[in-house]
Amino acid sequence: MKTLTQKTAPRDKYDRLIRALVAIIMGVVFNHFADRLLDAHIEIFTGIEYFSPFWVTDMFLVPFITGLITSSIYGFGGKWLSLLPPVIVRCISYYEIYNFSAPTKGSHLLPLGWWVLFVFLVMQSSLLGGIFGELMNKRAYGRSSKHLVHKDGKVTEKTDQVL
């Protein structure tokens, strides 16, 4: 008499790549539309009014939420992936302003060095959001407790359960 055994479906080898692409695309879409909604162009310097509450929101809060979204979709390791969407959006925006739309009268495009500094700040804000996204997924951060890994000098299987 034959017994039927169920085999689990093989995990798609491109699963992480697909999740990475979806996470990056969702982060880029959110960041782009939040930039358009706030209408704060980081790339165009207009004087002291440049540093408005909308600019601060666009520099720090929007990338934080973008990193949170990206890392939440991707999972473990998403904090590193969360650096890409703000860079992609900032590069596209700088290229668009440089080649297609000139800054208005009384304002000018930031020099590349200053722009890179601002992009670096945006990336750090996004990385912080990515770390919080990983914390939301895993509910723990860092190494597992020693009692979960080592038992009587022998290495046992790790568990992802939260105590």
Image: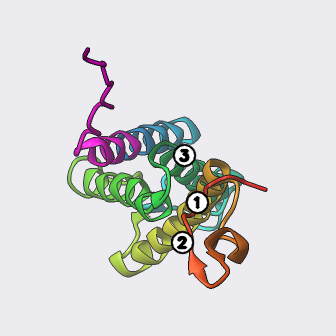
Q: Which tag is nearer the camera, tag 1 or tag 3?
A: 3
The circle on residue 59 is: 1
Residue 42: horizontal and vertical position, in percent? 49, 59
Q: Please, which residue is most extreme toward the bottom here? A: 153
Q: Please, which residue is most extreme toward the top here? A: 1
**Residue 18, above or below 41:** above
Question: Range of the magenta residues?
Answer: 1-23
Q: Circle 3 is placed at which residue position?
A: 72
Q: Circle 2 is placed at which residue position?
A: 121
Residue 153 in view: yes
Query: Gap between marks 1 and 2, in whole Å?
Result: 7 Å
Q: Quadrant of residue 12?
A: top left
Mark 3 and mark 2 lie on one chain; the one further toward the N terminus is 3
Residue 106 in view: no
Query: Gap between marks 1 and 3, in whole Å?
Result: 20 Å
Residue 102: horizontal and vertical position, in percent? 30, 52
Mark 1 and mark 2 lie on one chain; the one further toward the N terminus is 1
Labelled pair 1, 2 in contact (Cβ < 8 Å): yes
**Residue 89, above or below 50:** above
Mark 1 and mark 3 lie on one chain; the one further toward the N terminus is 1
**Residue 4, above or below 56:** above
Residue 18 in the magenta stretch? The answer is: yes
User: The disc labelled 3 sits on which kind of residue?
Assistant: Ser
User: The disc labelled 1 sits on which kind of residue?
Assistant: Met
User: The disc labelled 2 sits on which kind of residue?
Assistant: Leu
Camera-nearest residue between 57 and 162: 162
Tag 3: Cα neighbours inside 10 Å, few (<14), some, or many (≥20)?
Answer: many
Q: Quadrant of residue 55?
A: bottom right
